[in-house]
Image: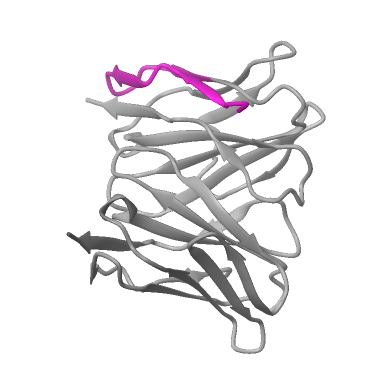
Amino acid sequence: EPEVTQTPSHQVTQMGQEVILRCVPISNHLYFYWYRQILGQKVEFLVSFYNNEISEKSEIFDDQFSVERPDGSNFTLKIRSTKLEDSAMYFCASSENWDSDGYTFGSGTRLTVV
Amino acid sequence: QKEVEQNSGPLSVPEGAIASLNCTYSDRGSQSFFWYRQYSGKSPELIMSIYSNGDKEDGRFTAQLNKASQYVSLLIRDSQPSDSATYLCAAHFNYGQNFVFGPGTRLSVLP
């Protein structure tokens, strides 16, 4: 079964450093998403991406965040200057259409900011 | 503000029993609803979706939707210890592409 692949599985970084989280969506999918989940809390939407541009973003997705699809397969989330409160699981997801029958989530990257 | 609410649990049921999980949502414009299962430290896995009022069955799982009451539920028949997880309800609102997730209900199936 096709998978969404995320790397690394765990990233530890110092406060103020930049991190890039990587995702390889399912190959025929056109819509890509980043969500995050702080430990013990809800899964929260960050951003959706279609046709090489952001289609929607949440209030969490401020100027410290950016997304990119640098080539035909990767989809990245960059946090420019990490804060302690950025520590969370970050999930990438993809779907074939915007009204697809649910997303396929990747296995996640646990980001720990120290 | 688009909200999805769930009882956080834990909900404990004995093995073989029916587990009933409930969810309410705030926006009448919501079009589709999803149940995800999330094991501790893992990503959400899609169990099933429902779009129309009524019941939808898939194996041991039945989703129920009542748009007038803004209520979605998931029944798990013949619960197994392997069903012990957090169950996330998500709504796909009419405008926008993202899902809004509820906080999840933790289910514990006791052998």
Q: Give coordinates of residue A105: x percent, y percent.
A: 54, 37
Res. A47 image quadrant:
top right
Name of the residue lying farthest toward the right:
A51
Magenta-colored stretch includes residue B75: no
Res. B62 image quadrant:
bottom right
Span shown in magenta? A1-22
- Left or right, residue B31 beside residue B100: right
Position above or below: A9 against B9: above
Magenta-colored stretch includes residue A13: yes
Front residue of B53/A83: it is B53
Res. B12 image quadrant:
bottom left
Identify the residue at image location x=34%, y=29%.
A110
Position above or below: B63 against A87: below
- Left or right, residue A110 beside residue B60: left
Identify the residue at image location x=28%, y=34%.
A84
- Left or right, residue A91 beside residue A9: right
Q: Give coordinates of residue A15: x percent, y percent.
A: 29, 23
What quarter of the picture does the C terminus of chain B occupy? bottom left
Q: Give coordinates of residue A7: x percent, y percent.
A: 45, 17
Identify the residue at image location x=76%, y=37%.
A96
Front residue of A52/A6: it is A6
Front residue of B78/A43: it is B78
Q: How many marks?
A: 0
Position above or below: A55 against B111: above
- Left or right, residue A67 beside residue A20: right
Q: Give coordinates of residue A46: x percent, y percent.
A: 55, 43
